[in-house]
Image: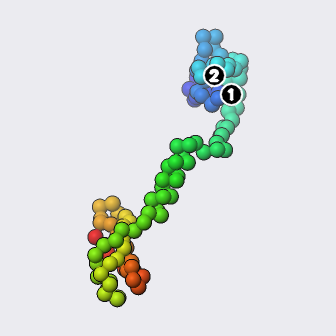
Amino acid sequence: MDMSPHFCGACGAVLLLGAGGAPSCDVCGASLPRGDANAELKLVTRRRLAPSETLRQLTEAATDVGGAQEAEISETCPQCKNDKMSFHTAQLRSADEGQTIFYTCLKCKYQFTHNS
């Protein structure tokens, strides 16, 4: 007895055997004649052409995080001795290690990193 699932050609849901032994779809109501259940199965994939509103919002939010403004801190620049620098952090190493801090001097634009 073949126990592999068969899928509805109309909506893609799993077909169940109906009372008469013919596969039928509980989702859209489509049914196949009894002999078609043993026919060769075809894989059909569908692709959405327009992304959902939720996906669009998540993509925008992820993009906005990368472009966030850097914070200012009272830190002395090793190059020009200015007392103000900007910084941002990123998790570049494994999760059980600290973040990498990227410093930029507001005066001379010298940059350096510190692994916390």
Question: What residue type is disc 2 on?
Answer: Cys
Residue corresponding to mark 2 = 28
What's the residue at 52%, 43% (across, down)?
A: 54
Mark 1, residue position: 10
Badge 2 or badge 1: first in the primary sequence? 1
Q: Nearer the viewer, residue 81 or 3?
A: 81
Quarter-of-image position of residue 93: bottom left
Q: Quadrant of the N terminus?
A: top right
For residue 32, above or below residue 41: above
Residues at marks 2 and 1, CA–CA distance in whole angstroms: 8 Å
Q: Residue at x 52, y 53 (%)?
A: 60
- Give me the residue at 50% from left, 58% from top: 63
Q: Where's residue 98, x and y in %?
A: 29, 66
Q: Quadrant of residue 82?
A: bottom left
The residue lying at 34 percent from left, 89 percent from top is 80
Any part of residue 58 in sight: yes
72 sits to left or right of 57: left
Q: Residue furthest top?
A: 19
Pointer 2 and pointer 1: residues touching (CB < 8 Å)? yes
Kindly identify which numbered label has been placed on residue 61.
Answer: none
Q: Locate residue 53, reporting x and y percent.
A: 56, 43
Q: Residues within 10 Å of mark 2 (few under 14, many from 20)?
A: few
Residue 92 location in percent, x, y?
39, 67
Q: Secondary structure at mark 2?
A: loop
| SS for dot 1 | loop
The answer to whether any part of residue 92 appears in the image is no
Which residue type carries mark 1? Ala
Based on the displayed image, in which of its 4 quarters is residue 101 positioned?
bottom left
